[in-house]
Image (cartoon, coloured by chain):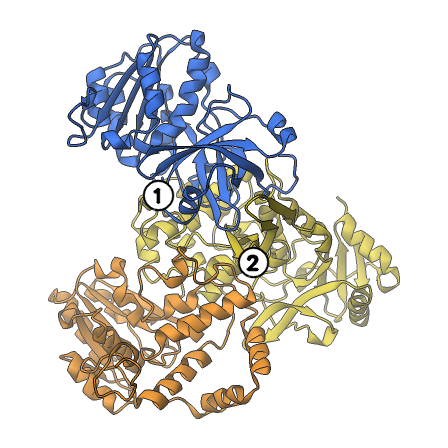
Chain colours: A blue, B orange, C yellow
Amino acid sequence: MSNPNIYIPYLMRIEKITQEAPGVKTFRLKFESEHEAEEFEFKAGQFGEYSIVGVGESTFCIASSPTRKGYIECTFRQVGRVTSALASAEEGDVIGFRGPYGNTFPIDEWKGKNLVFIAGGIALPPMRCVIWNALDLRENFKDITIVYGARSVADLVYKHELEEWGNRPDVKLVTTVDPGGETPDWKGEIGFVPSVLEKVAPSAENTIAIVCGPPIMIKFTFPVLEKLGFADHNIFTTLENRMKCGFGKCGRCNVGEKYVCLDGPVFSGEELKLLPAEY
Amino acid sequence: MNELIQKAKDLLESNAVQVVIGYGKGSADKTRAIFLTKSENCDQLLFDSRCVQNLAVYLTKHEIKHLGKLAIVAPIPVLRSILQLAAENQLKESDLVILGVSPESKLIEFESFGAIELFLDAHKIQIDEKYKATIDKIKAMPVSERFAYWMKELEPCFKCYACRAACPLCYCPKCTVENNQPQWIPAASHLLGNLEWHVMRAMHLAGRCTDCEACYTACPMGIPIHLLTKSMLQDVEEHFGPYGPSVGKHNTLSSFNPDDKESFIR
Amino acid sequence: MQIDNYLIRKTSLEKLFNNLIGNGKTVFAPKTSGKRVLFEDVKAFSEITEDYIVTTNSAKSVVFPRTEKLFSYKKTKEKTEITDASTDTFPEVVLWGTRPCDAAAFIPLTDTFNGDYPDVLYNNRLGKVYVLSFSCATCDEYCFCTSVNGGPGNTAGSDILFTKLSTGDYLAEAITEKGKQLVADNQSLFEAAPSEEKEPNLAKVTTYFNQDEIQAKLQNLFENPVWDEKSRACLGCGSCAFVCPVCSCFDIQDEAHGSKGSRLRCWDSCGFGLFTLHTSGHNPRETQGARWRQRILHKFLYMPNKSKVAGCVGCGRCSRVCPADINILETVTSL
C-alpha cells in the first residue's frame, strides 16, 4: 500500500452490483485513484477488508481473478451490521478496501496437473478467483473438474458463470443441491457435496484438490478425498476465521502458531492437520 | 465452619449434589471461589471477612450448570443475589442446595427461597452512612461540576467489563454493548463511551441491584462505580418504596399494578 | 551495545525530573490513586510514589493507547474524504518508574506491531518514548520475572535503568543511544560510576519454572483437563489482558457522528466470548477453558516458538487484579 498507515483503506467505487442469490451480492469495484489501480496487484486466494466508512469493516476474499486487471470483485451475504450497510450501497457509491492480505494458492506449482475444485454455498467466491485464474491460463493444466453445491437452486451463486463453465468442453462441472432443494426442472445432482464428490470419484493421480466450504462440509469432504487416494499435501483449502486487521496483529485469527490472515487463509491438508482444532 | 464442611462432605458423598461452590484459599492472603467435586477436598472450605466475592455469579454460567446439581456457600450478599435471580426466573429451587452463612459464620440450611426471604427480612439492604454522605455531596454539585467529577473518576476505565462479569445480575447472554445493530454503546473506551456504559449498566440494575459491591471490588482500577448503583438504589426506594429481592413481588421497574400511582400508562 | 554507568544523587534525580518537565516533556510516573498505584501524567516530583512493586496498570498505553484514532473521515453521497492520523501530534513521553519487567515487555509488543506490516502509529509513538526504569529492591509472591528470562535489575527495553544503592543515591545505567543522549543533555547531574555493586541491591526473585521446559511441556497439553479446571472461576472479563504490558489484541471500530467520524483501534481480549465468534454462530473457542488455554499457550508456547521471545514478563499484574483470583503462575507451575 502506498500509505505508510496500514489501516487506511483504498477508496473504491462500486461499478456493478449483481444479485447472486437471496441475500448474496457481488460488487465489481474500481479504484478511485488511477495510480492505485495501476499499482495494485494480488494473487489468487488473497482477501481484503471491505468497509462502509463509518459503519465498519468486513472480511471477504477477492473473488475476481488476478489475470483480469482494472477491477476487483467481492461476493458477500447480508448477515450483520457491515454487510447490511454494504447491501444497501448502490452502484456509484464509494466503499473502503484494505488489502490484499494473506497467502495465495500455489497455482504455479500446479502446472501440468489435474485440478478438482470442490465448493459449497457461499464458499464458491474464494474458489471463483482461483478457478478463473486457472481457466485464463487453461493450457497450463490438464483436466479441470468443478464440484459445487448449495442448499437449494436459489442459493447457487454465480449462476451465469456456472452456465459458462458447464458449457466449456474443457471443464467438467457437477452441480448439486441438498435433498429437498431441487426445483422441478433441476438437471444437476441431488445430494450433499461430499457424497456427490464420492460419486464423481476424480482420480487422485497427478491431481490437486481445492476445497472450500462451511466447517461441516470440510469435515466430511476430507475423508472422501482420503478415500479417493489424495495425499494431504495435494489438498488445499481456505479457512474462514473471524479476522479483523488482516495483518496478524489483532490476534483474532491466531490458531496455534499461525495467523490465518498471514500464514493463510490458504492451507494445505498437511498444514491443516498441524493446527489445533480452533478454526 | 466445621458444620459447613461436614454438610458439604455429606452432600457430595451422597451425590445429592455434584459440585460445591464455596470460598477457599487464594493467592497471597486472598480467598477465591472454589469448585469442589470430591468430598475429601471439602476441608479447603473457609469463611471469613476476606470472602467478599459474590459467588452467585457462577449460578448462571452454563459451564458450571453443566457440572450437575450445585450447592453454594451463601453469606448474606450471595443470599440476596440468589433471591433476586430466583425472582427473575433464573434459578429453580430444585437446582440448588443453599448453605447459608450467618453474620456470625454459622451454617443456616434453607429449604426454600421463601425461607431465604424470611431470613433476609431481618437483614435488609442498608446503604452505609459514609456512602450516603458522598452521594449527597455529589448530588449537591451543579451539573457541570458533577460531570467533571465523573469524567475524572471514569478516566482510568478501560472497558474490561470486570464490573459486568462479577455482577450476578448481569447474566444476559448478549449484553447491550455487544449489540451492534445499532451500536447503542460505543465499544471503545473514551470518556463519553465510558460514561454511557456505566450509566446504562446502573439503569439496567435499577430495582434489581442488591448492593453487594461486587462491581467495585472487581474493578481493577478501583473506580467507585458502586456509587452509581447505590444512588440508583436510593432513588428506587424514594420513588417506589422499600426495596429488596423477593420471589413474591416482581421487580420494581418491570412490573405494573393497576393501583400504582403512576398514571401515564393508563 | 555498551552500557555507560554513572552515579546520580537523590537530589539530582529530582533535578533531572524537573529538567524534563521544564523541557516540555510529558512524564508518566507511578502515582497513588486510592488503594492502587497507576501510571499517570505527573507535573511535580512529589506526586511520584516509590511505594509499589509494580503499578496496577501497565505503561503500554503510551505506545498502544486504549483508543487510537486510525483516521478520520468526512462523507457525502458523492465523495468520501479520509484524513490520516496526525503522528506529529503524538507527544514526547518520558516513562518514569517502569520496572525491568515493564521495559522488557516493549520487546514482544514491538515485535507484534512490526513484522511484514509495520504499524507507523505504534512506531512513531515508540520513537518518542523514553523508558526510565527503576530496579526492584523488593518483590512479592506474584512476581516471577526470573522464570521468563527476566530479572529485577535487567536492562532490556530501558533507555536508562536506575538502581537505588545503600547510600540512598542511584546507579544510573545509560543503555541506549537515547538514554546516553539524555545523560549528555543533563551531564552535570551524572557523576562517575559508583563502586558499590548493583546485585546486592536487587530483590531476590524466586525462580519457579524454566521457560524452555514449559514450552516443551505445552506442546502436548492441548487436550488436557487442566484448562477447564484452572479456569472454572474465570468470569470472562478483560482485566488480565488490559493490565498486561504485553497483551496487544485489539478491535477496530468505526464511530460516526453525522457525516463525519473516525475509525478507532481499541483494546480487546481473547478472554471475551465474542472474540472468535463467527457470524454463523460457530465459535472455535466456545468455553472459557478454551480461552484460558489460548492465553497460556499464546504467551508461553506460540510466541516463543515464533519469535524467540516469551509473551509474558512475569510482572504478575494479571493475577493481582483478577476478580476471581485466577493466578497465571499457579497455572503454569501446575502443568
Question: Mark 2 is on which residue type?
Answer: Arg
| Residue nearest the observer in this picture, A90 or A136 | A90
Label 2: state its secondary structure.
loop
Whether label 2 touches label 1, CB < 8 Å = no
Label 1: state its secondary structure.
loop
Label 1 crowd (10 A; few <14 / some 14-19 / many >=20)? some
| Residue nearest the observer in this picture, C308 or C210 | C308
In the image, residue B224 sits, relative to residue C290, either above or below, namely below
**What residue is at 71 percent from the left and 65 percent from the top?**
C27
In the image, residue C127 sits, relative to residue A151, either above or below, namely below
**What residue is at 71 percent from the left and 59 percent from the top?**
C93
Please state, as top left, top right, bottom left or bottom right, where the N terminus of chain A lies in the image: top right
From the viewer's perspective, tell me whether residue A169 is left or right of residue C318. left
Find disc 1 in the rendering and name its residue: C222
Residue B26 is situated, as x and y percent measured from the top left of the image, at: 39, 68
Residue A224 is situated, as x and y percent measured from the top left of the image, at: 23, 23
Mark 1 belongs to chain: C
Residue C246 is situated, as x and y percent measured from the top left of the image, at: 55, 52
From the viewer's perspective, tell me whether residue B219 is left or right of residue C192. left
Closer to the observer: label 2 or label 1?
Answer: 2
From the viewer's perspective, tell me whether residue B137 is left or right of residue B201. right
* Residue A232 visible in the current orientation: no
Among the two numbered marks 2 and 1 on one chain, the one whose residue lies closer to the N terminus: 2
Label 2 crowd (10 A; few <14 / some 14-19 / many >=20)? many
